[in-house]
Image (cartoon, rainbow, N blue to C red):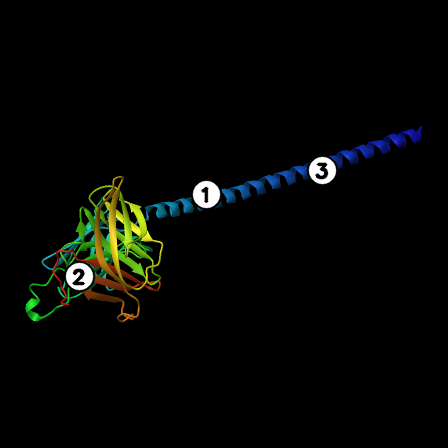
């Protein structure tokens, strides 16, 4: 009898110990679960905050990038020793103008991003004008184009008042130049097709450009050999990049306007491809004056040189004596 009582007592003790252990395990598991839940919530909160900050920063950067658009030059003209430039950019932003790297003026664009400036010029001094605006304190936007004003050389003192207008062009490396004013008071034109500038570099790559009064295609020739062809743009402009390397020296360049009925008109100019052996290559800007054409050579920021040639109409008089 006593043995049974002892056995029952032992079982009760074991049961109590088992319940105690189970209870302890449950409490421990609950504590661990609570700790893990808190840790997960803290981690999630940190991640949410991190990704939120990153997203906001990325969105801000993207918005900033989306607002970065080029500063564009729309027109350039000169009258009574005043150079008038009109263009567009960001709205209500200061636009700074430099001449050979020295700041000479600053204007503020209007609510549509349009701006204009009048710059005084010295009639016999060349100008190299660049534009820059700041869309924020640390985000400068530089215009791709550089405006060059190249006066005609003085032949003698008596000819100062009768000197031709200055050459005014806007150039972009690797793109055709825009001629805003020619010292020859016009460009070579025949039957509605006009030869604008010829731009080239030391490698021999050449860009021909001009305008056409009628749609169609333009085919460019060098010494009567076709070297490139392209369509007239919607605004009547055309430009053709020659895949062939033009040799140095003198060439006869022609541009023909072609429609489905064949060649309608053609304009030709005498062109000379210069090299660094001509003139002083150390000069940042050098002009080669010829009786019926001028060439401007400038040193590029990243290295190398680019040339722009412009030509006189057939009826023009020579500016530089032979």
| Mark 1 vs mark 2, CA separation in Å | 65 Å
Q: Nearer the viewer, mark 1 or mark 2?
A: 2
Residue annotated with mark 2: 292
Q: Earlier in the sequence, mark 1 or mark 3?
A: 3
The residue nearer to you, when weighing 192 against 70, is 192
Q: How many marks?
A: 3
Q: Tell me the element at label 3.
A: helix
Judged left or right of residue 301, residue 150 is left
Q: Earlier in the sequence, mark 3 or mark 2?
A: 3
Q: Nearer the viewer, mark 3 or mark 2?
A: 2
> Label 2: how many residues lie within 10 Å, few (<14), some (14-19) or many (20+)?
many
Q: Quadrant of the N terminus?
A: top right
The residue nearer to you, when weighing 219 against 62, is 219
> Label 3: how many residues lie within 10 Å, few (<14), some (14-19) or many (20+)?
few
Residue annotated with mark 1: 52
Q: Nearer the viewer, mark 1 or mark 3?
A: 1
| Mark 3 vs mark 2, CA separation in Å | 102 Å
The quarter of the picture where residue 112 lies is top left
Residue annotated with mark 3: 25
Q: Earlier in the sequence, mark 1 or mark 2?
A: 1
Judged left or right of residue 63, residue 269 is left
């Amino acid at each position: 009898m006593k043995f049974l009582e002892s056995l029952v007592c032992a079982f009760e003790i074991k049961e109590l110990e088992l319940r105690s252990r189970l209870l302890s395990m449950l409490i421990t598991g609950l504590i661990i679960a609570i700790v893990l839940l808190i840790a997960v919530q803290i981690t999630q909160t940190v991640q949410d905050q991190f990704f939120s900050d990153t997203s906001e920063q990325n969105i801000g950067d993207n918005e900033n990038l989306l607002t970065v658009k080029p500063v564009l030059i729309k027109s350039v003209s000169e009258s009574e020793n005043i150079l008038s430039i009109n263009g567009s950019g960001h709205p209500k932003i200061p636009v700074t103008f430099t001449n050979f790297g020295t700041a000479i003026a600053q204007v503020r664009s209007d609510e549509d991003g349009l701006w204009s400036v009048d710059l005084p010029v010295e009639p016999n001094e060349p100008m190299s004008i660049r534009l820059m605006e700041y869309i924020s304190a640390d985000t400068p936007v530089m215009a791709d184009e550089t405006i060059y004003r190249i006066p005609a050389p003085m032949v003698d003192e008596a000819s100062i008042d009768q000197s031709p207008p200055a050459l005014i062009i806007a150039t972009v490396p690797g793109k055709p130049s825009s001629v805003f004013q020619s010292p020859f008071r016009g460009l070579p034109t025949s039957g509605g097709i006009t030869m604008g500038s010829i731009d080239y570099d030391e490698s021999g790559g050449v860009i021909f450009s001009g305008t056409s009064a009628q749609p169609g295609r333009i085919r460019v020739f060098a010494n009567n050999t076709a070297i490139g062809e392209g369509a007239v743009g919607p605004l009547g402009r055309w430009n053709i990049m020659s895949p062939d390397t033009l040799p140095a020296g003198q060439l006869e360049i022609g541009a023909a306007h072609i429609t489905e009925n064949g060649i309608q008109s053609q304009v030709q100019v005498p062109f000379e491809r210069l090299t660094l052996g001509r003139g002083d290559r150390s000069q940042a800007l050098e002009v080669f004056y010829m009786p019926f054409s001028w060439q401007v050579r400038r040193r590029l920021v990243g290295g190398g040189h680019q040339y722009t040639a412009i030509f006189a109409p057939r009826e023009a008089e020579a500016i530089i004596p032979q």
